[in-house]
C-alpha cells in the first residue's frame, strides 16, 4: 500500500490551517483518516524545539541556528511519524515542510540557498510531498487577519520580511512544477477549498480509482 503526502505552505495568516481542516474533513467523509502534522512540532521533542523557536524572548537566535532548529524538529517528525505513516499507506497532511525553511530562512533571512537545500536534505533524506499547496496572499491582507492574536517571534518580524518570504514561495513553485500548486488565498475559505479539492480529485483520487 502506498501513502499520500500533501503539504501546505504560505505566509503566516494565509489560511492554511482552515484549508487543512477542510481537507481532512473531506477525506474523512470518504472514509479516509488522515494524519495531520504541524511544523515545527507534532512530536514531543519537536514541540519543545517549537517553544524555543517561537518564544519572543529569544531575540538572540541567529538565522543559521534558527534554520538548524527547524531542521532538527523536522528530522524527528519525518522519522518518528511521517515515514511510518506513509509506509502503512496512510494520508499525511503537513502544515509546513521544507519549503518553509527555504522561503523563511533562505529568502526571508538571506541564508545561502545551497546551505538551505543541504539542511533540508539532511532532515528529510530527500522525502518530498506529492502535492504542495502554496496559499498565496499579500502580506498586508495576512497581517490584518492576524491582528487579533498575540504575535510570536516569527510573526513579529514585519511586512518587508513577509514580502521576501512570499516571493520565495513563488520561486519555489516555479522550480517545482511537478508538486507545487499555487492557490489564491485572497478569496473566501470555500472558494479556496474548491480549488484544492479539484487538484486532489485530479491528481490522487482519479489515480486511486484507476489503479
Ligand atoms: P505557526 O504558529 O505554526 O504559524 P502558521 O500557523 O502560520 O504555520 O508558527 C510557525 C512559524 O515558523 C511561522 O512563522 C513560519 C515559521 N517557520 C520557519 O520560519 N521555518 C520553517 O522551516 C518552519 C517549518 C516554520
Image: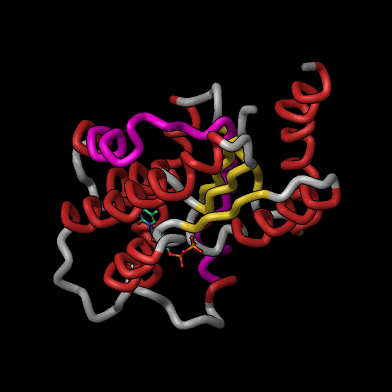
Q: Is residue 66 above or below residue 211?
A: below
Residue 188 falls left or right of residue 10: right
Magenta extent = 117-144
The reply to whether residue 164 is in sight is no
Residue 69 falls left or right of residue 7: left
The reply to whether residue 106 is in sight is yes
Quadrant hosting residue 46: bottom left
Q: Position of residue 202 (x, y in %)?
A: 77, 27
Q: Is residue 135 magenta?
A: yes
Q: Is residue 40 above or below residue 114?
A: below
Quadrant hosting residue 169: top left
Quadrant containing the C terminus is: top right
Question: 177 or 32, which lies in front?
Answer: 32
Q: Is residue 200 above or below residue 202?
A: below
Q: Residue at x 17, y 56 (%)?
A: 65
Question: 2 or 165, which lies in front?
Answer: 2
- Judging from the image, the colouring scheme is secondary structure
Q: Position of residue 19 (x, y in %)?
A: 68, 55
Quadrant containing the N terminus is: top right
Q: Position of residue 34 (x, y in %)?
A: 67, 49
Q: Is residue 36 magenta?
A: no
Amino acid at each position: 500500500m502506498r501513502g499520500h503526502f500533501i503539504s501546505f505552505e504560505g505566509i503566516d495568516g494565509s489560511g492554511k490551517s482552515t484549508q487543512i481542516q477542510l481537507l481532512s474533513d473531506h477525506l474523512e467523509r470518504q472514509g479516509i483518516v488522515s494524519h495531520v502534522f504541524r511544523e515545527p512540532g507534532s512530536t514531543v521533542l519537536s514541540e519543545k524545539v517549537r517553544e524555543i523557536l517561537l518564544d519572543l524572548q529569544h531575540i538572540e537566535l541567529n538565522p543559521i541556528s534558527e534554520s538548524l532548529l527547524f531542521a532538527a524538529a523536522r528530522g524527528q517528525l519525518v522519522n518518528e511519524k511521517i515515514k511510518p505513516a506513509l509506509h502503512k499507506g496512510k494520508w499525511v497532511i503537513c502544515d509546513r515542510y521544507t519549503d518553509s525553511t527555504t522561503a523563511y530562512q533562505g529568502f526571508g533571512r538571506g541564508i545561502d540557498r545551497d546551505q538551505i537545500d543541504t539542511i533540508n536534505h539532511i532532515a528529510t533524506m530527500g522525502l518530498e510531498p506529492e502535492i504542495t499547496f502554496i496559499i498565496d496572499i499579500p502580506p498586508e491582507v495576512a497581517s490584518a487577519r492576524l491582528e487579533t492574536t498575540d504575535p510570536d517571534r516569527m510573526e513579529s518580524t514585519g511586512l518587508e520580511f513577509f514580502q521576501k518570504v512570499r516571493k520565495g514561495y513563488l520561486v519555489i513553485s516555479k522550480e517545482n512544477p511537478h508538486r507545487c500548486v499555487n492557490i489564491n488565498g485572497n478569496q473566501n475559505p470555500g472558494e479556496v477549498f474548491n480549488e484544492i479539492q479539484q487538484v486532489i480529485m485530479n491528481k490522487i483520487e482519479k489515480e486511486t480509482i484507476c489503479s
